[in-house]
Amino acid sequence: MVSEPFEDSRRLTGANLYFDGAGAALETSPGLAFDADARQRWRDNIARARATLGWPAGAVVVREHASGASLAFAAPADQLYVATEVNEWALYSALGIRATDAPVDDEAASPRPHVAHFDDADALRRLQALAATEAKPALRALVEAARAHGVPAHADDDLLSIGEGEAAQAWALDALPAADAVPWSRLRAIPKAVVTGSNGKTTTVRLLAAMLRAHGLRAGYSSTDGLFVDGERVAAGDYSGPVGARTVLRDPRVQAAVLETARGGLLRRGLVAHDAQVAVVTNISADHFGEYGIHGLDDIAAVKLVVAKSLAADGVLVLNADDPLLVRRAVATGVARIGWFALALDDALARGARACGARAGSMLLCIDGIEHDLGAIAGMPLTLGGSARYNIANIAAASLAAHALGIAPAKIASVLARFGGCNADNPGRLQRWTLGDVQVLLDYAHNPDGLRGLLQVAAGLRGNGRLGLLLGHAGNRLEADFRALAAVAAEAKPDRVWLKDIGGDYLRGRASGEVAAILFGALRAAGLPAGALPVCLDEAQAACEALQWARPGDLLVLPVHEPARRDVVVDLLDRLQAAGWRAGQGLADA
């Protein structure tokens, strides 16, 4: 029996790593022999299928990488399920093999044949039948009409929406109107920003949304922590992909949108927005290696910079001048208007006249030679007196983005002077409690660079007390990633490290306790004693154990990731602080 030669066959619903529109992609299975002749046969098969189906010519991409190749091609946006079948058949045929699974997927919502099960002639006939069934000419006509009117259109499996936010209307795909029945004069785009990066995305999104609210707009945003409209959470969960973006852009209350855009959504589906005023890339760091052919920092940078394709013709791309990968790749994006931010303003100005950064203790926004003083950095709550350097960078990025959205510097400064002053402003990100003589930091730090930044803040607060740390990781990483995280933890010389799972969906294929065991071994190799490495797999229980261990003068650093467990920990810390809890008391005393 022939094993399946591919994995992750998927639709690309928007601009993506490979090309600017919709299409399909798959990853060849690791170790598959796929030489130049086979690659050419695959390309030829894509051309045959396009000719048979009457599809236009378009991009055909083979992206070779360390574990195989990504095979992608452009296809009509209303026939993407067929496009995935075309891709799978083209690969099987190029290899001279047939699929060995069942020829019909009876478990699918709409059962369809796996055309790679059949010989080429039969496969092409079946593809024609599938294409005729899936094609949605009415949808295609409306999308083209929206383009002609200069109005954005967003489609998924159920709905087509034209316009955005308060100026949008949506229809079920089986009840689409004629183009002349659409109220075009009432439909338009809304101001929007797209934010990505390895660290700092959610903080930057929240800060930018607060600036939009101060500007007088009802802001909606999508993020890893949920969907929010005008400061209120309307849905919990990770919405940093296309579903979250479309949901915000369809909400009739929303007047401006900020869309957190994570790597996974970019690789699985692509972009939603294509006429944003600004796109931000906060930074590039090691994370998620081994998925979708991403094996190094250059690969991650290429994925993150896909957000440049979300910009309107006059949009601004905001990049980190302290990140050499972004500096090196900026010109290749083709974006004419780039804003640069850096910890030091002069480093940003060295890249361009649209810049933001620190000088002499103040945050300065510079636009074409005009300087705007946004205030003393030490007085901005997000910076913890200037010690949280990564939040200084996030502030600079958000300030540039806000200016690109038309927000006045005085409004930007007013938000920076107060945002982060209470834990509710930025939940799960550098939240701080003082419990008697014990200090507690709670954060989302989830990769080596993020943890390093958090522990640098902790070092400035630590004093002479002990350091306690929670440590865990999502399961969908390489063991080398876990060891790198442990190395950063060991550098901080913690007195105790509680090793935990990140529960729920975050186990991602690993057994409970597996990641903790790898971290334990890495920390022992770094010289930490076994007695200082208790294993407590439940995140909330681990936080409780840390609090019970603490004595006056200690500092606890609690990276808690699973949202439900984080809510439990935050509620406990709020109650302890309100009750005047002190080290040595029972937690039930709160």
Image: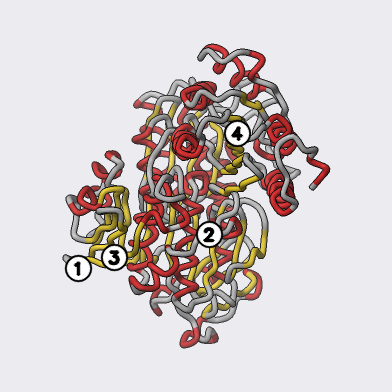
Kind of residue indicated by mark 2: Gly
Nearest the eye: 52 or 196 = 196
Quickly name the residue at label 2: 421
- Please rate how many residues cluster around mark 1, counting C-alpha atoms within 10 Å: few if below 14, some from 14 to 19, many from 20: few
The tally of labels here is: 4
Kind of residue indicated by mark 1: Ile
Instruction: Give the mark nearest the N terminus, 3 or 4.
Output: 3
Kind of residue indicated by mark 3: Asp
Of marks 3 and 1, the one in the foreground: 3
Quickly name the residue at label 3: 373
Estimate the x, y position of residue 165 in percent, counting from the top left. 53, 74
- Please rate how many residues cluster around mark 2, counting C-alpha atoms within 10 Å: few if below 14, some from 14 to 19, many from 20: some
Is 384 on the left-hand or right-hand side of 102? left
Kind of residue indicated by mark 4: Asp
Residue 370 marker: 1
Nearest the eye: 396 or 118 = 396
* Label 1 with label 4: CB-CB less than 8 Å: no
Residue 138 against residue 442 in the figure, above or below: below
Of marks 3 and 4, the one in the foreground: 4
Instruction: Give the mark nearest the N terminus, 3 or 2.
Output: 3
Instruction: Give the mark nearest the N terminus, 2 or 4.
Output: 2
- Please rate how many residues cluster around mark 3, counting C-alpha atoms within 10 Å: few if below 14, some from 14 to 19, many from 20: some
Residue 532 against residue 437 in the figure, above or below: above
- Calculate the distance from the C-alpha at mark 2 to the C-alpha at mark 1: 29 Å
Nearest the eye: 304 or 198 = 198
Query: What is the quadrant of residue 301 in the picture?
Result: top left
Q: Does dot 2 land on a helix, a strand or a loop?
A: loop
Of marks 2 and 1, the one in the foreground: 2
Q: Is residue 110 visible?
A: no
